[in-house]
Amino acid sequence: MDQEQLIQQADELGKLFIAKKLRRTTAESCTGGQLAVALCAAENTPDFYSCGFITFNDDAKSNLVNVRPETLARYTAVSQQTVEEMVAGAIARSGEDIGVAISGYAGPDGGPDGTPAGTVWFAWGHAENIKTAVKRFEGDSVSVLQQAVVYAISMLKEYVTHSER
């Protein structure tokens, strides 16, 4: 997907959020703000997106979005437990309705625990209804990051489309 198509997807997502009178926040690790960049390029961004947190290392995850050090020590930064805490923390800190969190190993190396490069965890939803998924993307790190952003947008579109709020 090229940049123009990505912005089109972000526009569609923004329109869904605006139609449902919802706002969102992001907590990104491996994508380093690339999801936020796509959202900021969409139309009427301030009407559906207030802020994002880039939490590349463990200290940032703990300090900015309240991931517990015990969670990071036990499960690592690239885990279901961590992204659940990231999205819950981002929602709590921002006061927004819906959040999305992304943490993974884009490459070229995987995790010290043997998790392969290309593994990315996602969490999204309302504070009381958080969904998670793990994906394994192929390609170089730039490709993995782009695929992760595209996947996050598509999952949010699906979630908001079927949300009763």
Image (cartoon, grey):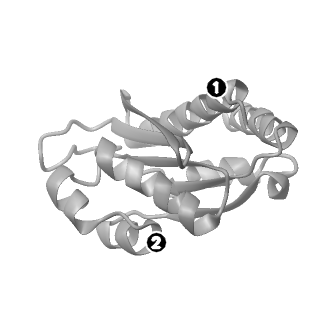
Q: Amino acid at mark 2?
A: Leu
Q: Position of residue 99 (x, y in %)?
A: 58, 49
Q: Please rate how many residues cluster around mark 1, counting C-alpha atoms within 10 Å: few if below 14, some from 14 to 19, many from 20.
A: few
Query: Which of the 4 image quadrants contains residue 160?
Result: top right
Query: Disc 1 designates what residue?
Result: 158
Query: Which residue is located at x 87 percent, y 51 percent?
Result: 44
Query: Disc 2 designates what residue?
Result: 64
Query: Which quadrant is the C terminus positioned in?
Result: top right
Q: Amino acid at mark 1?
A: Glu
Q: Residue 163, relative to residue 53: is it above or below?
A: above
The local secondary structure at tag 2 comes to: helix
The local secondary structure at tag 1 comes to: helix
Q: CA distance from mark 2 to mark 1?
A: 27 Å
Query: Which residue is located at x 57 percent, y 30 percent?
Result: 155
Labels 2 & 1 near each other (Cβ < 8 A): no
Q: Position of residue 109 (x, y in %)?
A: 22, 45
Residue 105 visible to an observer of this rendering? no
Residue 41 visible to an observer of this rendering? yes
Sequence-wise, the earlier of marks 2 and 1 is: 2
Disc sitting over residue 66 in the figure: none
Query: Which residue is located at x 83 percent, y 45 percent?
Result: 21
Of residue 153 and residue 131, the one placed in the foreground of this image is: 131
Query: Which residue is located at x 55 percent, y 63 percent?
Result: 92
Query: Which quadrant is the N terminus positioned in?
Result: top right
Of residue 144 and residue 61, the one placed in the foreground of this image is: 61
Q: Position of residue 122 (x, y in %)?
A: 44, 40
Of residue 25 and residue 120, the one placed in the foreground of this image is: 25
Q: Position of residue 144 (x, y in %)?
A: 43, 36
Of residue 72 and residue 1, the one placed in the foreground of this image is: 72
Left or right of 63, for residue 10:
right
Query: Which of the 4 image quadrants contains residue 140?
Result: top left
